[in-house]
Each structure stands twice: as C-alpha cells, then as structure tokens.
Amino acid sequence: MTGGRQMPLTAVDTVQATDDGFIGRKKVRPDDPYLSGHFPSLAVYPGVFLIEGVQQMLELHLDGALGGIELTSVESARFSTPVLAQDEVVFDTRVTGARPQISTVTTCTVNGQRCARITATWRCAP
C-alpha cells in the first residue's frame, strides 16, 4: 500500500505505441497472486485480468502512468482459449475516439493464436 491506497495488480509488462493504438505484453507467471486458487488443478489466467490489462496499457499509452481512466462499458468480450501460467499474452489494441470517451478493440494472442477479443469504452480526464 502507498499512502493508504492499495496499488493495483500489475497486468502489463510492456506497452509500445502503434499508428492506431498499441501493442502490449504480459507474461503470466505461476506465482502471480491472481492465479492462486483460480482453477487449482489448471491455473487459468482470469479473463477479467485481460480486461484489466487493456485498461492499464491504455493508461500507460495515453498518460504514461496508471490511474485516471475508467471502464464505462464492455460491448463484447469473447474468450476463445485459456491463458495459462508461463504464457505471454500479446494485446493488439486499436484506439478510437477522443477524450473524455475512448473506445478500444483488442485482440489478445498467445503464440500467435487468438485467446480473446475485447471491445470496450473508457472515460478519461480531458
């Protein structure tokens, strides 16, 4: 905790800007705290953390720091294959709109195979 505020779980390792958005990466580590107890016989990375990953990467992409962007809606979230410990997820995200409302379409892949597609809308400071 910092200043009475609990820091978020890290759902991002790197973010790189592209012409219309960003490419982000997250290596799922077996000791990540959100894997504990989540399907104990098969440590599956929770889909909600893919959405959290998009948010954290969007914050870093737009502002260079975590915080300040709020999820307002998930129009679609399709999870097609599980993400497991040791996988590296690549987030290919297109960003449209302008502050205060931003929209994203993200294709998540592991080893080149799509594992999720997430369409969402975010509110951020002007």
Image: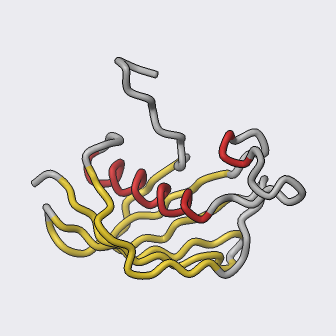
Q: Quarter-wise, where is residue 105 in the image?
A: bottom left
Residue at the extreme right of the image, as rendered: 41
In the displayed structure, 50 sits above or below 64; it is: below
> Measured from the top left, where is residue 58 in percent x and y?
35, 57
Could you tell whether 109 is left or right of 86 in the image? left
Q: Residue at x 25, y 75 (%)?
A: 96
Q: Residue at x 66, y 46 (%)?
A: 34
Could you tell whether 113 is left or right of 41 in the image? left
In the displayed structure, 24 sits above or below 21; it is: above
Residue at the extreme left of the image, as rendered: 126
Residue at the extreme top of the image, as rendered: 3
Q: Residue at x 38, y 80 (%)?
A: 75
Look at the image and tell me in which quarter the C terminus lies: bottom left
> Measured from the top left, where is residue 9 in percent x and y?
53, 40
In the image shown, does 89 or 117 lie closer to the viewer? 117
Q: Residue at x 25, y 46 (%)?
A: 68
Question: Which of the colour schemes (rainbow, by chain, secondary structure, one colour) is used?
Answer: secondary structure
Q: Quarter-wise, where is residue 73 in the image?
A: bottom left
Could you tell whether 25 is left or right of 72 in the image? right
> Measured from the top left, where is residue 51 in percent x and y?
48, 63
